[in-house]
Image: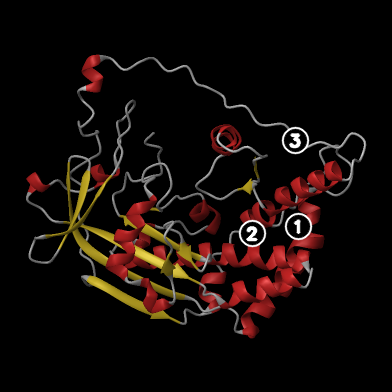
Amino acid sequence: VILGGAALTRAYVEQDLHEIYDGEVRYARDAFEGLRLMDALVAVKRGVPGAALPGLRQRRHARVAPARPDERSRGHVRSDVATDNPVPVPPFWGDRIVKGVPFTDYAAWLDEDALFKGQWGLKASRAGTGPSYEELVETEGRPRLRMWLDRLQTSGWLEPAVVYGYYPANSKGDDLILCNEDGSERTHFTFPRQRRGRRLCLADFFRSEESGERDVIGLQIVTVGSRVSRFAAELFAADSYRDYLELHGLSVQLTEALTEFWHARMRRELGFGDEDPEDIRDMFALKYRGARFSLGYGACPDLEDRAKITGLLRPERIGVALSEEFQLHPEQSTDALVVHHPEAKYFNAR
């Protein structure tokens, strides 16, 4: 069994999951590592001398002192996140659907490094022989990227769509409560809190109920549609593995580009988009105000909360469905909580 994905770590797969499965379990960072694992497995099966699967990666345990009694009793204590930041006024309450986002608008947000290194596996030889990464980008990466972008722009394989909205919200301890316009509770999220350090919790970035001031949270679900997935599957079935891997990886990164593009639009709608840096590399480095938090990551790890987002945004209207395992389909889809607080940056609560 080969597992990967943003919500998994190598230690979790190769230690925790390996212990409860009778066969072999390995983690693959990307499709290229998965192919190398398959090559090794085939070599083992064929009895190639010296062939072996890579060893299991051992978890590194940090030395953590046990919490003192007074710390354990303070698990609910709010962090030092500021409470006097201005609360923006959204352009509307509730949700809206946008379809047919122009390709050139969001393709400009494509992170080439993430595509070339993470998805396409371009890397220089460790031995120092052969072309450098920069040379590979110029001779292989960008020419192939231009070819795929031209095909995608004219093929109709992409069906970009967004459903997003703004909702009144307040915090109460570790809970974030989303309200109806009359103040009644619509739904709520319970987020984990750090046990050490600043003791951050995602709820801290919103005004508390006791403040008497209503805050706002943004939600978004974006997709580039299922058509590109079907075509990628046809390439795979035809044994066109390079084309399959490149198209699949590019469609994933274009989904991320659409997500970033729409997050920038939401910042403009909330009135602070002019604070964004001009250099796109600074955008990729998250040097803008606020953050978008996706389910399954450190600050909001509970994937079941995804049902609350889809319940509000009803993404079936743009062709996105939620599976029983709380995964969005098609795969080229993302969701996010959009937080406007100036101190909101990614953190791990566990």
Numbered label attached to residue 112:
2
Give whichever of 82, 77 is nearer the camera. 77
C-beta proximity under 8 Å, tags 1 and 3? no
**Rounded to the nearest whole Å, what is the CA distance between mark 1 and mark 3?**
28 Å
C-beta proximity under 8 Å, tags 1 and 2? yes
Give whichever of 291, 47 is nearer the camera. 47
Tell whether 70 sits left or right of 279.
left
Q: Position of residue 187 (x, y in %)?
A: 20, 58
Residue density around tag 1, few if under 14, some if 14–19, many if 20 or more, within 10 Å: many
C-beta proximity under 8 Å, tags 2 and 3? no
Q: Residue furthest front?
A: 22
Residue 290 seen in render:
no
Numbered label attached to residue 204:
none
Tell whether 216 sits left or right of 258.
left
Residue density around tag 2, few if under 14, some if 14–19, many if 20 or more, within 10 Å: some
Identify residue type, mark 2: Glu
Q: Earlier in the sequence, mark 2 or mark 3?
A: 3
Q: Secondary structure at mark 3?
A: loop
- Residue drawn at point x = 68 percent, y = 54 percent: 31
Q: Position of residue 46 (x, y in %)?
A: 89, 45
Q: Earlier in the sequence, mark 1 or mark 2?
A: 2
- Residue drawn at point x = 81 percent, y = 54 percent: 135
Tell whether 66 sits left or right of 19.
left
- Residue drawn at point x = 56 percent, y = 24 percent: 60
Identify residue type, mark 1: Val
Residue 348 seen in render:
yes
The residue identified by callout 3 is 54
Mark toward the viewer: 1 or 3: 3
**Rounded to the nearest whole Å, what is the CA distance between mark 1 and mark 2?**
9 Å
The residue identified by callout 1 is 137
